[in-house]
Image: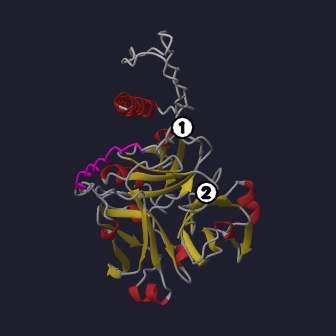
Amino acid sequence: MVRNTAILAVVPCIGAFDAVSLLQQHVVMDVEDYDYDGDLTDPVEGKGKSGKESPTPAPTDGPPPTPAPPGPTALPTPAPTPEPTAAPPTPAPTAAPTPAPTAPQFCSGTSANWKAYNGYIMTDIDTSSCGFTSTPKYFTTISGNSNHWSTTGATSIYSATTTGFRVYIWKSGGVSTTYASDRAWRINWIGQISTGTTSSCALSDSPTTWHNYNGNVYADVSTSSCSHSTMPMYLASLSGSGGQWTAKGTSSIYSESADHYRVYLKYDGSSTIGSRATSSNWYLNTLSLDRNQAPPGLCTGTSDAWLSYSGHIMIDVDTTACKFTGAPRYFTSLSGDSNHWSTTGATSIYSETANGFRVYINKEGGVSTSYAASKNWRINWVAVE
């Protein structure tokens, strides 16, 4: 009984040890009952009843553990957005330098401030509003309702400065300021200080070289510095220190070409004009213009549609192509082949409107339309609105 008790005590010990080992390997083992037929001795570890080593069964591999699902992919840590670099402060605008005043290419106006002068009349033209920085070349015509076609002097320039000039008007038998005012006589003027452009070129031929012509004088005026590409038209005025207001011929243009023209001057009933022209330093101012210009700016043209008028001639000049909205200032000259230097009236403007004006031509002894046509007489005109 004692031996049986000892065996029972050992068996639980072995079973407990093996059970722990097997539990650690997650293996379940069945324990067989053995018949005891020999001495009870402690078994050699790892051997059965035959004394042979009992194979320890290889642990059965269980299924591989299921990998844990991947965690969410961590978002990359965004690089911190650098603070924007502050823009440099906006500099205060640099004030543009004030340019020197630009002299106008041309400036025009009208005046009727008549004053008495030894039985005739004169007017001082104020051009100070133009802002001329040097003395310009002035060109003029005379407008009115009646009787100014027989005057002289409207295109004779005296005392020219940056701020004005003077004109004297001569008429046979004399003329008063009241007479002029009653007929709305007025001086139209345009001033230009330099050559400007090829389409509008102003120059002075000073001193002008005068040549004798049967007790009268003529001058050839070069316009080559104007560089016109086509045949231009010319307006002229006569400057000097005295005596030019009673001369005829200033606005009568002869021998016109792209680079020159000629003017003849005369005193009625006198052969002293040559000496006076030289002693009083007469010189011609020229406004050389491309023909058929259209606004903006100047508008120019030529007309030769002569009509009869009480033994003389007249012409109605159509300026509708200029599309003026109001009556502009008209400036004129008379071109031809011969005999127009002794006329008056070419620079006397009548009935001016936005669409045209009229000119009467007076010649001692009368003149016909056929005579004017045979001498190729024509009116050159420029309009300034």
Is the residue marked by circle 2 packed among few (<14), some (14-19), or many (20+) residues within 10 Å?
some
Kindly give the residue lying farthest to the right in the view shown. 370
Mark 1 surroundings: few (<14), some (14-19) or many (≥20) residues within 10 A: few
Going 64% across and 53% down the picture, which residue do you hit?
Answer: 336
Region of the chain picked out in magenta, as a range: 75-91
Q: Which residue was labeled with disc 2?
A: 293
Circle nearer the N terminus (2, 1): 1
As shown in the figure, which amino acid type bears the numbered disc 1? Thr
* Residue placed most toward the observer, 384 or 262: 384
* Residue 120 numbered tag: none
Real-space Cα distance between discs 2 and 1? 101 Å
In the visual, does 346 lie left or right of 283?
A: right
From this view, report whether residue 349 is shown above or below residue 335.
Answer: below
In the structure shown, which secondary structural element does the residue marked by tag 2 occupy?
loop
Q: Which amino acid, by three-letter code, is at mark 2?
A: Gln
Measured as percent of width and height from the top left, residue 171 is found at 46, 75
Residue 16 screen position, x and y as percent:
38, 34
Tell me if residue 11 can be seen: yes
